[in-house]
Image: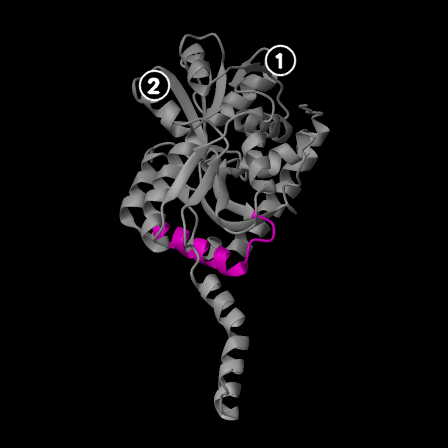
Amino acid sequence: MIKLPRRQFLHLAIGAAALPVVSRMASAQAYPSRPITIIVPSGAGGPSDVVARVMVEGMRGSLGQPLIIENVPGAAGTLGIGRVARAKPDGYTLAFSGSFTTHVVHGAIRTLPYDVVNDFEPIALVADGPQLMSSRKTMPASDLKGLIGWLKQNPDKASLGQTGPGSPAHVTGILFQKQTGTRFQFVSYRSAGQAMQDMIAGHIDLMFTAPTIALAPLQAGRIKSYAVTAGNRLAMAPDIPTVDEAGLPGFYASPWNALWAPKGTPHDAIARLNAAVVDALADTTVRKRLADLGLQIVPREQQTPEALGAFQKAEIEKWWPILKAAGIKVQ
């Protein structure tokens, strides 16, 4: 048996006791130490998927690890979001989605196996995507005030195309009816592109839709557009007035994108991920690509986890009473 001097023994004992602490510190500092999976709860090529891929390219450099997008469509996004809610809260499984639907609307109209607020950690609000209110080319009204007047004079005669109960266009249409005292019919389509084709053909009258869908037929003179559902004009369509300018002040309805982690994800991991989002949103290439998609990047002070949490709660306070009053329920 080897005998060690007392002082050397104490040094070794203290060092051994410190090893778990050092190991834990190294582990915490090492995040991320392996690839990160980002769940997009819709199919490849959809609006959220396109934005997620732009962001992933901008975030890789900051994190130093591969970011793998996994598309998990189904049940209007609840399959993918539910998978993230149940994932291990270690920072390696995240959700990126059009969070207006998944983290606000669904909480009011669906019975979910998770809580849209309490089962997630906010990471960052990325951008919002104002919609264009458009109509068939032969609609008599030439501006938004005229359109509202025509709808009031012709209750329930007009139709608005949308992609199903709880879709952005559907809930925006409900808000529009509430604020203007108008009534019209909702027609469901499998995609906004199909609805646009029917509006071009004159089969439906109205749409709230993304600029990327509306601008090409608008520029070709095949439809009309009355306003942007936001307080700022779009860089890609500067001639279209805001709802404030067009006569319906405060009528803001913009689907927005955000990044979330499972509840209980370590604060250090959230901070690293948030910093990567902030870096990406400061990159001129990322900013241009998002602007080309008709998206507006939120100001720097609104890119924090705390700001996303507060924004989600404000959106819930705004939309849930409207949706519940409308009686929308999807099983």
Q: Quadrant of residue 279?
A: bottom left
Q: Is residue 23 left or right of residue 176?
A: left
- Measuring from the top left, give residue 48's x and y in whole percent: 44, 33
- Measuring from the top left, give residue 286's x and y in whole percent: 31, 44
Q: Which residues are magenta?
A: 262-281
Q: How crowded is the residue under tag 1: few (<14 C-alpha within 10 Å), some, or many (20+)?
A: few
Q: What element does badge 2 sit on?
A: helix
The amino acid at mark 1 is: Asp
Toward the left, the furthest residue is: 285
Toward the viewer: 278 or 35?
A: 35
Residue 251 visible from this viewpoint:
no
Q: How crowded is the residue under tag 2: few (<14 C-alpha within 10 Å), some, or many (20+)?
A: some
Toward the viewer: 57 or 128?
A: 57
Q: Residue at x 44, y 8 (%)?
A: 202
Q: What element does badge 1 sit on?
A: loop
- Would you name the residue on which mark 2 appears? 217
Of mark 1 and mark 2, the one earlier in the sequence is: 1
Q: Is residue 118 left or right of residue 288?
A: right
Toward the viewer: 66 or 270?
A: 66
Q: Residue at x 41, y 8 (%)?
A: 201
Residue 4 visible from this viewpoint:
yes
Q: Residue at x 63, y 37 (%)?
A: 319
- Would you name the residue on which mark 1 appears? 156
Q: Quadrant of residue 306?
A: bottom right
